[in-house]
Amino acid sequence: MNYDLELDKVASEINKASATTVMLQLPDGLKPKAAEIQDMLKQKTKARIIIWGGSCFGACDVPSNLDVDLLVQFGHSEWK
């Protein structure tokens, strides 16, 4: 199954925010693609892209005490 992660849109938001350090939070099903996602975003931004290795059970499961400019949380449902 293919997913549209809207990585061009994510890169645009990173650039718009002038974020220098960005954390990606991925559900378990996307974690095998983490390096690929990270590489693509590194190519399209000047940000340092790091991957959260902990849990991601939904929008309420946000890591605390982060020293990042932007947290990008991927999930299973589309937000409008």
Image: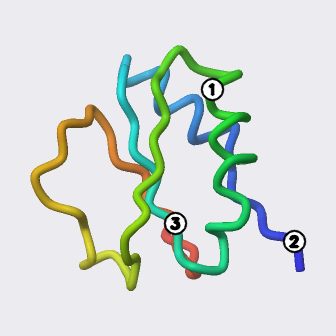
Labels 2 and 3: the sequence-earlier one:
2
**Observer-nearest residue: 65 or 3?**
65
Q: Could you tell me which residue is drawn at 44 percent across and 60 percent down? A: 25
Q: Would you identify the image quadrant in which residue 61 lies?
A: bottom left
| Residue 62 located left or right of residue 17 | left
Quarter assignment of residue 57: bottom left
Q: Residue furthest bottom?
A: 57
**Which quadrant of the structure image shows residue 59?**
bottom left
Residue under pointer 2: 2
Give the mark nearer the N terminus: 1 vs 2: 2
Coloring applied to the structure:
rainbow
Residue 18 place in picture, x, y as percent:
37, 17
Residue at 62% across, 26% down: 42
Q: Is residue 40 toward the left or the right of residue 11 in the image?
A: right
Distance CA(mark 1)–CA(mark 2): 21 Å
The residue that label 3 is drawn on is: 26
Q: Amino acid at mark 3?
A: Leu
Callout in the foreground (1, 2): 1
Residue 51, given in percent of the width and then of the height, sits at 47, 50
The count of marks equals 3
The amino acid type, in three-letter code, at marker 2 is Asn
The Cα atoms of the two marked residues, 3 and 1, are separated by: 17 Å
Among all residues in the image, which is located at the extreme left?
65
